Image: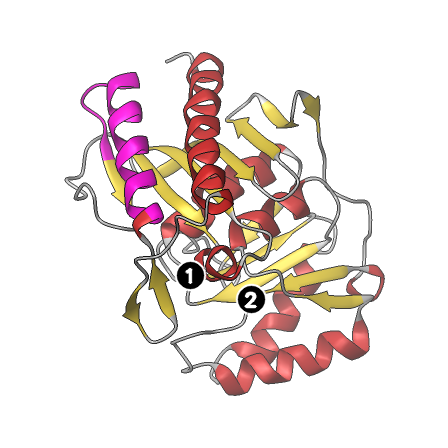
Amino acid sequence: MELEKICNQTIGIVRNAGAYILAQQNENLAPGIEEKGRHDFVTEVDKKTEEMLVDALGKLLPGSGFIAEEGTQADRGEEYQWIIDPIDGTTNFIHGAYPFAVSVALAKNRKPIMGVILELGFNECFYGWSGGGAWLDGKPISVSGNRTLDSSLIATGFPYSDYSKLDGFMRSMDWFMKHSRGLRRLGSAATDIAWVACGRYDGFYEYGLHPWDVAAGVVILEEAGGRSADFKGGDDYLFGEEIICSNGLNHNEFIDTIKQLMNGS
């Protein structure tokens, strides 16, 4: 499989989807808001964008399957699967705030091997594929060189429906406010991970996430020299609903800190 070629074609498909999203926003055509769960929203634009992506990506790789946030296609266990978030950061989109992003990954046997993230505020396209490096609009990117959490800028995401680990999460925010260069929350996990990959952030952690939130980002991050783990330091971050993303240099300290603060809470 020519991953570079497929990645370039995927970028074109994602950019078309992004243009549609922005057109709807600019023309104030983004009503039809539904609440899937507490503070968990979907718009007609999410649904239409996902339909567009599923149709185009299905033609790009016939026989492939889909794991998609809005359920346009069901996961049938195909060897190759597209993992899609049509708008990562829907609440931001609804309120006219940035960032929000289109996130598309290709997985083989449920392991992501290619990812594309188009952040629509800065109109930046991050992408990468296994063995091919990580890129931002045609330029190679890499993680930061900060070796300690004390010198790191950390990103996170606030829980909006799952409060089962809230006590530990509150402890973690308190700790990072006091022991890092700062804590940021943008509202788009895909963008957060992409920003770790290009060195704007030195780490990111969040729980309550889904495969479509992180799949594209972890490919780009790994190709940029970073690392991902779950809160126990294992590799169940794609489907385990929790993730730590680091620049690799602060990885062990980051894991040890999250273990202490979050696990068992």
Of the pair 50 and 82, the residue shown nearer to us: 50
Camera sees residue 81: no
Q: CA distance from mark 2 to mark 1?
A: 9 Å
Residue located 67% across and 48% down the image? 196
Residue corresponding to mark 1:
209
Q: Report if residue 64 lies within the magenta region.
A: yes
- The secondary structure making up most of the magenta span is helix
Q: Report if residue 190 lies within the magenta region.
A: no
Camera sees residue 173: yes
User: In what element is the residue under mark 1?
Assistant: loop
Residue located 38% across and 43% down the image? 86
Residue corresponding to mark 2:
157
Is 170 rendered above or below residue 122? below
Type of amino acid at the residue the image marks with label 1 = Leu
Residue located 29% across and 41% down the image? 48
Magenta residues span 45-65
Residue located 49% across and 32% down the image? 116
Is 215 rendered above or below residue 233? above
Relative side of 162 to 149, left or right: left
Check if mark 2's residue and mark 1's residue have beta carbons within 8 Å.
yes
